Image (spheres, rainbow, N blue to C red):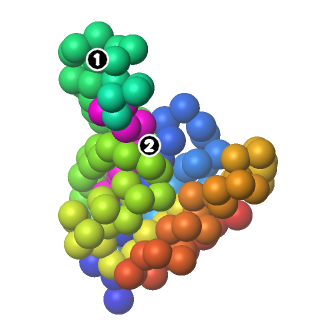
Amino acid sequence: MYNKILLPVDLNEEASWSKALPTALTLCRTFGASLHVVTVLPDVHMPLVGGFFPEDFVDKARDAVSDAQHAFIRDRVPEDIQVQSVIVDGSPWEAIIKASGKVEADLIVMASHTKRKFTDYVLGPNAEHVVHHSKVSVMIVR
């Protein structure tokens, strides 16, 4: 039923994966699917924002996130699961959808955050945006 499962992970926020990861692993084993762990880097290329960072900031940030994501995979994804590391830039929900297309995922498994911040009320939570804009099935884990 599923061949490629995308799991968005905020490496600094355990709530983004603590319940979703076990669910994604079970689905991978059940369907023989591969797991694609995606982490989103904030977009700092806008002139207003980018001017505040050193020239090599994006490369260093990408390297640091890559190292952290590989450690996350090594420590938390069992060896019997075929896994791929994916790092994308941009707003979280748009980058998650972009990543799902890039890896040709047929399911996105993601956590629902219960802590709502002011920006969630103004912009809407990322999970909600992914559900509404994704062309593939989305499983929200609470």
Kindly report which numbered mark, 1 or 2, lies closer to the viewer in this rendering.
1
Q: Is residue 103 visible?
A: yes
Residue 57's disc is 1
Rendered view: 135 above or below 92: below
Q: Which of the image's four quarters has the C terminus?
A: bottom right
Of helix, strand and loop, which one carries label 2? helix
Q: Callout 2, which amino acid? A: Arg
Q: Residue furthest front?
A: 48
Tell me the distance, in whole angstroms, between the alpha carbons under discs 1 and 2: 28 Å
Q: Earlier in the sequence, mark 1 or mark 2?
A: 1
* Relative side of 17 to 24, left or right: right
Residue position marked by numbered label 2 in the rendering: 76
- Residue 123 or residue 131, whichever sits in front: 123
Question: Which residue is at 22% across, 65% downward?
Answer: 103
* Relative side of 133 to 139, left or right: left
The magenta region covers 35-45
Question: Which residue is at 22% across, 14% downward?
Answer: 55
- Residue 42 or residue 73, whichever sits in front: 42
Q: Is residue 23 visible?
A: no
Q: Are marks 1 and 2 in contact (CB under 8 Å)?
A: no
Question: Which residue is at 54% across, 74% downward?
Answer: 131
Rendered view: 81 above or below 40: below
The picture quadrant where one finds residue 83 is bottom left
Question: Which residue is at 76% across, 45% downward?
Answer: 117
The picture quadrant where one finds residue 57 is top left
